Amino acid sequence: MSRFLSDQAMRIFISMDVKYFPDKKSVDRAMKDDDPLLVLVAFNGDEIIVSNADDSVEHYILLKQVGHSELEIDQYFRVVINRSGADWTFVCPASYANIKDRYRRIEKYYSDGIDEISKALKVLGYDVPVNIPDRYRRHFNELRDSGK
């Protein structure tokens, strides 16, 4: 494995627990076929949960499939990936990092998300850009319009 990953990527790989649904073989097949994958990355960076989109359909369903409560959805960054990119479902929980100020909270969420999602992509073997689709850019429009 070390032939393929840098020392830094190896440290990241070792520290992140990757859960595959329904199993690693199914996810590997989906990756080979470039099917879209649903990926959940824990805010603390300790866990990645991944499934073929056809096997789970929604991120909260994927959580349930691996034994978590769907109520834990606000503890994960939600991403859909394939070889063309990583689309981040940018939904910043009001309780994120216990930051009361909305603009500071969104900035922190964005910064942390880019870091953790980028690490997860490396662990999964993807070298693709992280994109926030237009429908999830309302927070950025708010920041822009407020002059922050």
Image: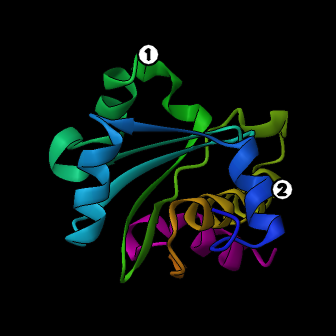
Query: Dot 1, how many residues are within 10 Å of its Cα: few (below 14), some (14-19), or many (20+)?
Result: few
Per the rendering, the mark at residue 91 is: none
Pick the quarter of the image with the C terminus: bottom right
> Which of the pair 105/72 is nearer the observer?
72
SS for dot 2: helix
Q: The disc labelled 2 sits on which kind of residue? A: Arg
Residue name at image x 82 percent, y 67 percent: 7
**Would you name the residue on which mark 2 appears?**
104
Marks 1 & 2, CB-CB < 8 Å contact: no
Query: Residue at (51%, 60%) from the top-left corner?
Result: 124
Q: Is residue 137 magenta?
A: yes
Task: Residue 108 in the image: state x and y as whole percent.
Answer: 80, 56
| Residue picked out by circle 1 | 69
Viewer-nearest residue: 68 or 14: 14
Type of the residue with mark 1: Ser
| In this view, 16 is above or below 4 | above
For the point 75% across and 42% down, the residue is: 15
Question: How far is mark 1 from mark 2, CA to CA?
Answer: 28 Å
Eyeballing the image, is 132 above or below 113? below
